[in-house]
Amino acid sequence: MANEFNPELLMPIEPVQLFDDYYFIGNQLVGFHVLKTSQGLVLFEAMDCSDAYEKFLQPGLAKLGLANEKILMLFLTHGHFDHYQGADSVRLACGCEVALSKEDCAYMAWCDENRDKAPELPRITHLIQGGDSLCFGDHTVDVLDGKGHTPGCLNYSFAVHDGGEEHRVIMVGGYGVFGPGNYIGSYPYTTQWAVEQALDFAASQTRTWEYVKEHHCDVYLNPHPHLCDMLAIAEKNKARAPGQPNAFVIGEEGVRKWLVERFDVCLQSAADFSGIRSAYPSKTT
């Protein structure tokens, strides 16, 4: 069948270097984002398998020449099963902290999405929230409120470097807008809750845009490679000639387009979930 899931998408891919100090290790759907700092490594996300450290991260770091680097922190964007399942394997192997918002610590325990797929939850050792900034040697990670995809979803921003030039990443933690008619199976929550989450998501995009303008973010990333064209852009970079710009650098305007696309989807989803437009059609004269 054409719509059957391809299990090869879950097989490890070759580790990818996106910037001088930034890497991706995982598969075509999810993975570890790795930021190298002067003190050690900072990770974002923990994949969708409990053995992610042994199967993906450890061999990936070895291939990148980073096996001897200390892992300082593992940041999670939100409490969905495909982002946290490998967190404990990393924490137990490396002794690092695992960070998430308090809202999503609760959400990952009760949400319908996780119950059958990943009932064993990771230990969160460090609670964070929008507005926090955490320093790791020569890098600082800013935490932004990104709620809407989940109640406590987080976005992250940090500097990366390419040939001596500094750029700033905005990693938007959420993507899908869930509600009646847009969910795997029967939507288990109330229509009003879905509407409110969609509107929260739209609002978080506007806050993120204000941050992007203030801090001149020129690189956009999503935890899922396929939702930000990551692997295609990385392939493009392999062919660039000396002196050519890094293809991940798209400028503030490029970042804005990604945010606007989600903003529009959020507003349309809120209208679709509620049925408010069809319930009150405009009159023609």
Image: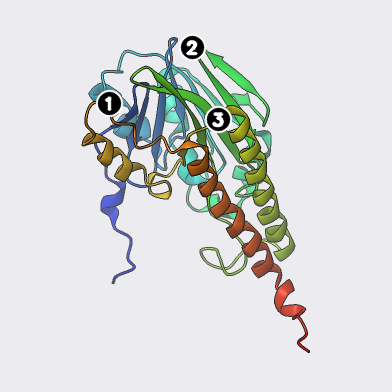
Tag 2: Cα neighbours inside 10 Å, few (<14), some, or many (≥20)?
Answer: few
Tag 1: Cα neighbours inside 10 Å, few (<14), some, or many (≥20)?
Answer: few
Question: Mark 1 or mark 3, which is nearer the start of the sequence?
Answer: 3
For this view, does 181 lie left or right of residue 233?
right
Question: Mark 3 or mark 2, which is nearer the start of the sequence?
Answer: 2
Q: In front: mark 2 or mark 3? A: 3
Residue wearing tag 2:
138
* Residue 264 horizontal/vertical position (percent): 60, 58
Amino acid on which disc 2 is placed: Asp
Of residue 130 and residue 81, the one placed in the foreground of this image is 130
Q: Is residue 175 above or below residue 160?
A: below
Q: Separation of disc 1 and disc 2 at Cα?
A: 25 Å
Residue wearing tag 1:
243
Res. 27 visible in picture: no
Amino acid on which disc 1 is placed: Gly
Tell me where residue 164 sits by quadrant: top left
* Residue 48 horizontal/vertical position (percent): 42, 43
Res. 119 visible in picture: yes
- Report helix, strand or loop for mark 3: loop
Q: Which residue is located at x 62 percent, y 67 percent?
A: 180
Q: Looking at the image, do the residues carrying marks 3 and 1 touch, with CB atoms under 8 Å apart? A: no
Q: In front: mark 1 or mark 2? A: 1
Question: Mark 2 or mark 1, which is nearer the start of the sequence?
Answer: 2
Q: Which residue is located at x 41 percent, y 31 percent?
A: 33
Residue wearing tag 3:
216
- Report helix, strand or loop for mark 2: loop
For this view, does 236 lie left or right of residue 199?
left
Q: Quadrant of the N terminus?
A: bottom left
